[in-house]
Amino acid sequence: MERITLRKLKKKKEAGEKITMISTYDFISARLCQEAGIDSVLVGDSLGMVFQGLDTTLPVTLDEIIYHAKAVRRGAPDLFLIVDMPFMSYQVSVEEALRNCGRVVKETGAQAVKLEGGEEIAETVSRLVSSGIPVVGHLGFTPQSIHKFGGPRVVGRDEAEAEKLRKDFKVLQEAGAFMIVLESVPWRIAKDLTESSDVITVGIGAGRYCDGQVLVFHDLVGLYGDRKPKFVRRYVEGAKIFREALERFKIDVERGDFPSEEESYGA
C-alpha cells in the first residue's frame, strides 16, 4: 500500500473523494485498518474510556498516548497517523504545547497532532504549524470540556453556539489547521463549513456532508453491546461473536474436549 500523506488527503478533498478514519489504540486493530485500506488512524484520548474503562478522557497522560500511538504506527505503517494531545498537555503555554507535540511526533511517527478548542488555542496552532507540526482541530462537542458541557450533547443548535462554531472554525483555518473534526454538530452547519473552506472536515455525528468520517473501532465492530451513540453504525456484533467463542472455549475445556490430540505436542 502506498503511504497516505497530508498531500494525498488534501487531493481527496479537492477531488470530492471521501476520507475514512478510524480511532484505535492497538497494533492488531491498526493492522486491520491497514489491510482494509482505511485512509487514516487517530489515536484518540478516548482510549481512557474505551481501553482503560474510565468515565472520561481527562486522566489520559502524555506517556500513555505515546505508548498506544507507537503500537498503532507499527500496525498501520502506511496510514496517516493523527495523535490526540491529552488534557493539559497543550493548554498551559504555547512553549509547553510545542515541546509535548514535538515529543509525540518524534517518538511515535505521527504525521499530525489533534487539539480541542477554537479561538483560545489559535496561537498554539499557529506556532505548531510554523514549527513544522501539522495540526488537526476539534470543534463541537469536545470531550476534554465534558464538565463544562455537563455531558455529551449536540453543539450548535442555538444561534449563539452556531455562530461560535463558525467563528472558531475560521480562526483555526487562519491559524493553519489543515483538518478539523466536527463532533455532534448539526449537519447543516457541518455542510456549510465543509463547502466554504479548503480545510478538510471529518465528522463524527456531524452528518454526511463532511469530507470524511471517523468512528471508534470498538463502536464500529460492536464490542460495546450496551453502548451505541446515535451516530454509530455497527457493522458487526463483535461482542456477541467474541462472547460466544469464549463460552464455547469454557465448555470444551470443562468437558475435556480441548485440547485435542491434534492440538497437543507428542513426546
Image (cartoon, rainbow, N blue to C red):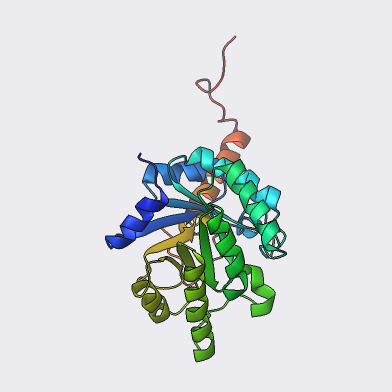
Q: Residue at x 49, y 63 (%)?
A: 177
Q: Position of residue 112 (x, y in %)?
A: 52, 53
Q: Residue furthest left?
A: 15
- Left or right of 20? Residue 47 is right
Q: Position of residue 188 (x, y in %)?
A: 38, 81
Instruction: Name which quarter of the figure residue 249 lies in.
Output: top right
- Left or right of 67? Residue 234 is left
Q: Position of residue 231 (x, y in %)?
A: 46, 70
> On the rendered image, what quadrant is the C terminus found in?
top right
Q: Position of residue 201 (x, y in %)?
A: 42, 66
| Above-or-below relation of 106 to 233 | above
Could one spot residue 87 in this view of the protein? Answer: no
Count of numbered badges drawn on the protein: 0
Q: Residue furthest front?
A: 130
Q: Residue at x 57, y 41 (%)?
A: 71
Q: Nearer the viewer, residue 205 or 263?
A: 205
Could one spot residue 148 in this view of the protein? Answer: yes
Q: Residue at x 58, y 47 (%)?
A: 105
- Left or right of 199? Residue 120 is right
Q: Residue at x 64, y 44 (%)?
A: 67
- Left or right of 61? Residue 72 is left
> On the rendered image, what quadrant is the N terminus found in?
top left
| Above-or-below relation of 13 to 118 | above
